[in-house]
Amino acid sequence: MTGVQFGKRLGIRPQSVETLEKSETNASIQLKTLRRAAAALDCTLVYALVPNASLEDAVRDRARKIAIRDLGRVAHTMKLEAQATGDANLEARIEAYIRDILKERDLWNEP
C-alpha cells in the first residue's frame, strides 16, 4: 500500500503519512494515532508489557534485595557494637531471611 493510499484510508494527506511513519520510528507516536492507523488497516492495536523475567524470578529478586538491605543494616549496627558476625554463612542467612520475607511481607510496599 502506498502512502497516498494509506493517507486516504486514514483521511490525511500523504505528507502526514510520512510524519506518522517518522513518529513511529522515533517512538513518539501516540497510541490514539496507532489505533487509528490500525483501524484504517482493518487491524486491532495490541499494546502489551512483556516481563524480562518470570514472575517467580521478579519476586525472588525483590526479596533478595530487601534481605541484603536489611541484613546489611543489622551487620552495620552489630559492627558498631563490636559484635560483627563476619561474612561466614552470609549466603545462608540471606536465603533464610528471603524465606521469611516471602512468607510475611508485601514486597512491593518497600522503598
Image (cartoon, rainbow, N blue to C red):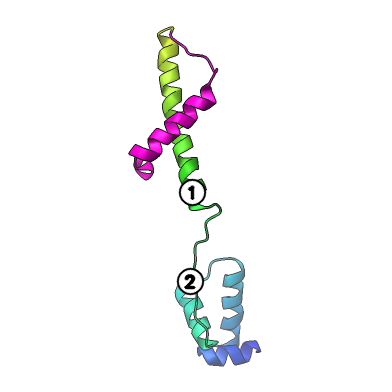
**x and y, in percent, of residue 51 in the image:** 52, 56
Number of residue marks: 2
From where the camera sits, is residue 79 visible?
Answer: yes
Residue 30 badge: 2
Residue located farthest toward the right when viewing the structure as drawn: 2
Q: Which of marks 1 and 2 is in front?
A: 1
Amino acid, disc 1: Glu
Residue 78 lies left or right of residue 16; in this view the side is: left
Which residue, given by chain and number where applicable, does mark 1 sit on? 56
Residue 74 badge: none
From where the camera sits, is residue 111 visible?
Answer: no
Mark 2 surroundings within 10 Å by alpha-carbon count, few (fewer than 14), some (14 through 19), many (20 or more): few
Residue stretch rendered in magenta on the structure: 83-111
Q: Residue 79: which quarter of the image?
A: top left
Residue 111 lies left or right of residue 48; in this view the side is: left
Q: Indicate the secondary structure of the residue bearing disc 2.
A: loop
**x and y, in percent, of residue 46 in the image:** 50, 73
Above or below for 64 versus 28: above
Return the residue nearer the eye: 34 or 53: 53
Amino acid, disc 2: Gln
In terms of sequence position, does the residue under pointer 1 or pointer 2 come before the other? 2
Residue 25 lies left or right of residue 35; in this view the side is: right
Return the residue nearer the eye: 10 or 91: 91
Above or below for 35 versus 29: below
Residue 102 lies left or right of residue 17; in this view the side is: left
Q: Which residue is drawn at 56% across and 54% down?
A: 52
